[in-house]
Image: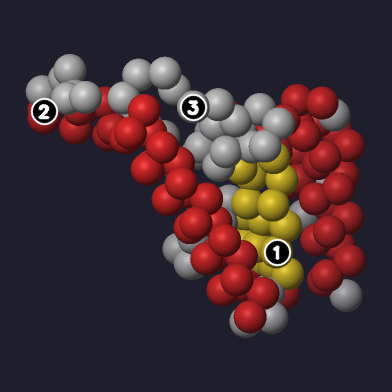
Amino acid sequence: MADNLTKEQRAKNMKAIKSQSALENRVTKALWKMGLRFRKNVNLFGKPDIALKKYKIVIFIDSCFWHCCPIHGNMPKSNMDYWEKKLKRNISRDIEVNKFYQENGWNLLRIWEHEFKEDFNGTVNKIAGFIRERRR
């Protein structure tokens, strides 16, 4: 199915997409208030949402849609060929990123968006615990 927007309109829409979500900002503010210091959206492989290079810690906050959550992920009904290809590539990229960090001795944590919706404070505490354990 052809795109119903012009090339210029599509470019404008894509440029408007933020690299950080409101959820990521809430999470990082909560972690910062707990006294944890880190960098956001670091220019490392896979662009982790949170990184502590010194301790080789990377954390990814995965959107249920973009990363195809097995519980909440859904396939759009229009332009299915495009979305299927796009989302499958995201899954394979996540696997590639995980493998890279594991092979290079990094501490990797992936958190689903829905985990924050179910228990925001508990999930933030899970991340804080992960960081604190690996800083030792």
Name the residue that disc number 1 marks. Answer: 108
Estimate the x, y position of residue 9 in percent, counting from the top left: 16, 23
Instruction: Decide which of tag 2 and tag 3 comes sooner along the chain.
Output: 2
Q: Residue at x 38, y 33 (%)?
A: 83
Instruction: Decide which of tag 1 and tag 2 comes sooner along the chain.
Output: 2
Amino acid marked by disc 2 = Glu
Instruction: Decide which of tag 1 and tag 3 comes sooner along the chain.
Output: 3
Q: Residue at x 76, y 38 (%)?
A: 30
Amino acid marked by disc 3 = Met
Amino acid marked by disc 1 = Leu
Local SS, label 3: loop
Tag 1 near tag 3, CB within 8 Å: no
Q: Is residue 35 above or below residue 70?
A: below
Estimate the x, y position of residue 96 in percent, counting from the top left: 52, 66
Estimate the x, y position of residue 77 in percent, counting from the top left: 42, 18
Name the residue that disc number 3 marks. Answer: 75
Local SS, label 1: strand
Q: Is residue 28 above or below residue 94?
A: above
